[in-house]
Image (cartoon, grey):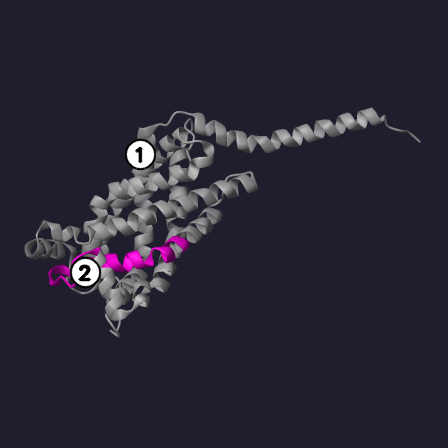
Amino acid sequence: MSSKDPHTDSLDALKFKMSAQKDSDKFFMSISEREKKPVDVLRALYDGCIAGGVAGVVVETALYPIDTIKTRLQVARGGGQIILKGLYSGLAGNIVGVLPASAIFVGVYEPTKQKLLRSFPENLSAVAHFAAGAIAGAASSLVRVPTEVVKQRMQMGQFKSAPAAVRLIVANEGFKGLYAGYGSFLLRDLPFDAIQFCIYEQLRIGYKLAAKRDLNDPENAMLGAFAGAITGAVTTPLDVVKTRLMVQGSQNHYKGIYDCVSTIVKEEGTHALFKGMGPRVLWIGIGGSIFFGVLEKTKQILAQRHPKAELHN
């Protein structure tokens, strides 16, 4: 019967522990090293524009009918009946605006996020993601607002085509008519963009640290759905106000954001501020799943075209 030297056993145990610790640290070191590398702004802008454009068009096309139902629910006053015909009304014209808007958003978000992550301490990464989302939202709003105005007017059956909608809105309300509800749009979308992307990015960081590996496509989609659903529910009142202001046209039912909120509460009750929350949460939850799933996959494909450049998440 042979006996092992206790000293040898302890050395083997120590080596095993150090090896396991080294392997465990590889994932965390890869994150830190990636953060130290200089930002290729043009590459991030280019890849972000393509990935954002593709993701935006895919999700808009897939979920447009739910968005139309949500809009009609929010605009209906009192016990107004919801029309379920023409659920794809205005889709083609909307995609013309969604493509550049999504491209601008992600194209601005990616390099801004990477720059801010290098400027902020690691424990403030959420602030960097939040700020990058708000900045990107502001940049893309110049395209998103006219697109949203035209889309929602067409969803309500006010116009038959996007070109006719633009022409008649400008003729009847002036160029500013294309930016109707701009203040309420920023009030809704800047917090929405900042919160959604912050939640998504923080969930990805936490998931990566827990799993000690990169996320796969279903996991990205799952986290995107969760981030979208939570943000959609929280910002529903802002969305209702934005929708009412955008579709009122020259009728001027509401004089501004405050007047819109007070009038809705007075005439229809506080619950009216949460109209369409079900379709909105469903739409944005599924949309978040599709958008972030397609976004990450497109970024991965683009990164493979640049084998010497690491993809910055």
Percent position of residue 171, x then y: 6, 55
Q: Report the residue at 64% width, 31% height from top.
A: 21
**Quick one: 189 or 219, which is closer to the camera?**
189
Q: Residues within 10 Å of mark 2 (few under 14, many from 20)?
A: many
Does the magenta segment cover residue 256? yes
* Label at residue 10: none
**Magenta span covers which residues?**
230-257
Q: Is residue 149 left or right of residue 57?
A: left
Q: Nearer the viewer, residue 185 or 19?
A: 185
Residue drawn at point x = 56 percent, y = 38 percent: 212
- Quadrant where the C terminus is found in the figure: top left
For the image, the number of numbered tags is: 2
Label 1 belongs to which residue?
A: 45
Reading the image, the residue beneath label 2 is 247
Left or right of 87, for residue 24 = right
Q: Examine the structure image and report whether residue 235 is included in the region drawn in magenta.
A: yes
Q: Residue at x 35, y 62 (%)?
A: 277
- Three-letter code for the amino acid on which mark 1 is drawn: Leu
Most distant residue in the right direction: 1
Residue 304, horizontal then vertical, whole percent: 41, 34
The residue located at (28%, 67%) in the rendering is 73
Identity of the amino acid at label 2? Val
Q: Quadrant of residue 282?
A: bottom left
For the residue pair 180 and 86, the one nearer the viewer reads as 180
Label 1 and label 2: CA atoms lie apart by: 33 Å
Q: Secondary structure at mark 1?
A: helix
Residue 96 vs 26, above or below: the answer is below
Q: Position of residue 124 (x, y in %)?
A: 43, 36
Q: Position of residue 298 (x, y in %)?
A: 38, 41
Q: Using the image as rendered, state which of residue 9 and residue 262 is in the foreground.
A: 262
